[in-house]
Image (cartoon, grey):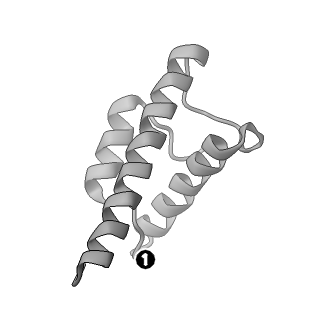
Amino acid sequence: KPNNMNDTRVVRQFSEKWDKNVEDLKAYKELHGHLNVPQKEGALGRWVNNQRQFYSKRVKGEKTSLTEERVKALEELGFVWTL
């Protein structure tokens, strides 16, 4: 939990960046018809790969930044966790 203004700002920036990546992912799906962004596709591809890695860790019970809310948000878009 954030315990001062600086921590709160960092958490908010992290959340806004995640939200922007989700918007970029929606645009990618609109253009390509799927959410399987190749890693070589740049920042979005790396982000998608990271979400899959975080999900794998989460399933194993490890702590990650991928919350249940974020899992649901990605699944509502049709996100595929394993390829």
- Quarter of the image containing the N terminus? bottom left
Q: Residue 15, image x and y in percent? A: 35, 55
The answer to whether 49 is drawn above or below residue 78 in the figure is below
Q: Is residue 40 left or right of residue 68?
A: right
Q: In the image, residue 18 lies at what x, y percent?
A: 42, 50
**Image position of 38 with respect to 67: above or below:** above
Q: Please tell me how many numbered marks the rendered image carries.
A: 1
Residue that protrudes farthest toward the front in the picture? 5
Q: What is the residue that sits farthest to the right in this orientation? A: 40
Q: In the figure, 49 relative to 22: above or below?
A: below
Q: Amino acid at mark 1?
A: Glu
The residue shown at (49%, 69%) is 57
Circle 1 — which element? Answer: loop
Within-10-Å neighbours for mark 1: few <14, some 14–19, many 20+? few
Q: Residue at x 43, y 38 (%)?
A: 22
Between 79 and 42, the residue placed more toward the observer is 42
Going 22% across and 84% down the picture, which residue do you hit?
3
State the image coordinates of residue 66 (x, y, percent, origin top left). Answer: 39, 60
- Tell me the quarter of the image containing the C terminus: top right
Residue at (49, 62) in percent of width and height: 54
Q: Label 1 belongs to which residue? A: 62
Above or below, comparing residue 69 to residue 54 in the picture: above
- In percent of width and height, residue 79 lies at 46, 36
